[in-house]
Each structure stands twice: as structure tokens, then as C-alpha cells.
Amino acid sequence: MQILYLYMLVYRYDSQPALFIVTINQQKVCRLKEGMVIYMDYVKAFLIGGLICALVQILMEKTKMMPGRIMVMLVVCGAIISVFGWYEPFVEFAGAGASVPLLGFGNILMKGVKEAVDEQGFLGLFTGGFKAGAVGTSAALIFGYLASLIFNPKMKK
């Protein structure tokens, strides 16, 4: 049985850093030295999602691209990767780390368009993305509106 040791610096509830030794075996289970059990899927999702976010943050800081354009670029990249059929294996590997960022939204839109084109033909090009992305878009609008009611939004000067 092959075991991988990973050293993690974790900040506990009392803000004191603690060094954990994580052992990862072939059952995809991590065992922390203090007896906690974490499934490897969570670790992979955290690492892959964090890597995507870190790369986007670097792109935002090192270029003069506006955040809106970067977001559109991520959705389009997710749709293009989905066209080639590479996104599903990526989601199988990374789990929520690949499906939650904006790349995943592009994948959802493209899957909806593919299904609608198969069912409705040319008209599915225009309706598929709306049907597939309706829940996520509606949730973003509703929760954004509720947050604006709770907090006092202000424009930056």
C-alpha cells in the first residue's frame, strides 16, 4: 500500500497555527495526526479550485483586463473545453473544484445548448443555454438582491 505524506499548516479556531501530517492512502482518505478524517475528494476540490482562483487572481493583477472581461473569458473557456469533451473528465477528477468556478458555468451552458440542439434543431442554439443556466442565474440575482437589502451597497469613488 502506497502512502503519501503531506504536511499542512492549518490555523485552528484559536488562531494558533498547527502543523498536521496528512497521510493519503489508496482509499482516497486522509488521516490527520489528531484523528480527524477528511476525504480526498474535498482536498482535490480545494486544491484545484484554489489553483483556478489563484491563476485568475494573477491574471487580474498582472494585466489591465477588467474583471468583467476576465469573467466572460472564463465562461467562454469553460464552454470551449466542454466542446472538445475535456471538461467532464476534469470534473470527474476535481469534483466541485472544477464545477463551481465560472469555467463550470460555461460547461453547463454548452451542455444545455448541445441537448437543446439535439432536441429542437437550430432553435436549440438560442434556448438551450437559458434553460441550463436558469437556476444558477436566478439564484445569483435573488441572493444578490437579498444581500443588497441587508447591507448598504455603495459605489466606489
Image (cartoon, rainbow, N blue to C red):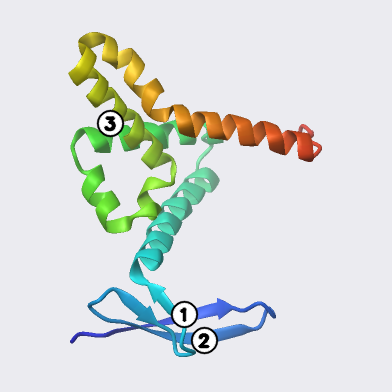
Q: Earlier in the sequence, mark 3 or mark 2?
A: 2
Residue 30 screen position, x and y as percent: 36, 79
Q: Rounded to the nearest whole Å, what is the CA distance between mark 1 and mark 2? A: 6 Å
In this view, 128 is above or below 153: above
The three-letter code of the residue at mark 3 reads Lys
> Residue 69, can we see it?
no
Residue assigned mark 1? 8
Identify which residue is drawn at 37% across, 71% down: 39
Identify which residue is drawn at 34% across, 34% down: 108
Residue assigned mark 2? 19
The residue tagged with tag 1: helix, strand or loop? strand
Q: Of the residues tagged 3 and 1, which is closer to the observer? A: 3
The residue tagged with tag 2: helix, strand or loop? strand
Q: Rounded to the nearest whole Å, what is the CA distance between mark 3 and mark 1? A: 37 Å
Residue 10 screen position, x and y as percent: 55, 78
**Is 49 on the left or on the right of 126, as rendered?**
right
Q: Of the residues tagged 3 and 2, which is closer to the observer? A: 3
Of 11 and 139, the residue lying toward us? 139
Identify which residue is drawn at 18% across, 36% down: 84
The answer to whether marks 1 and 2 mark residues whose Cβ atoms lie closer than 8 Å is yes
Disc number placed over residue 38 in the picture, else none = none
- Number of marks in the rendered image: 3
The residue tagged with tag 3: helix, strand or loop? helix
Residue 129 screen position, x and y as percent: 36, 23
Q: Rounded to the nearest whole Å, what is the CA distance between mark 3 and mark 2? A: 42 Å
Residue assigned mark 3? 111
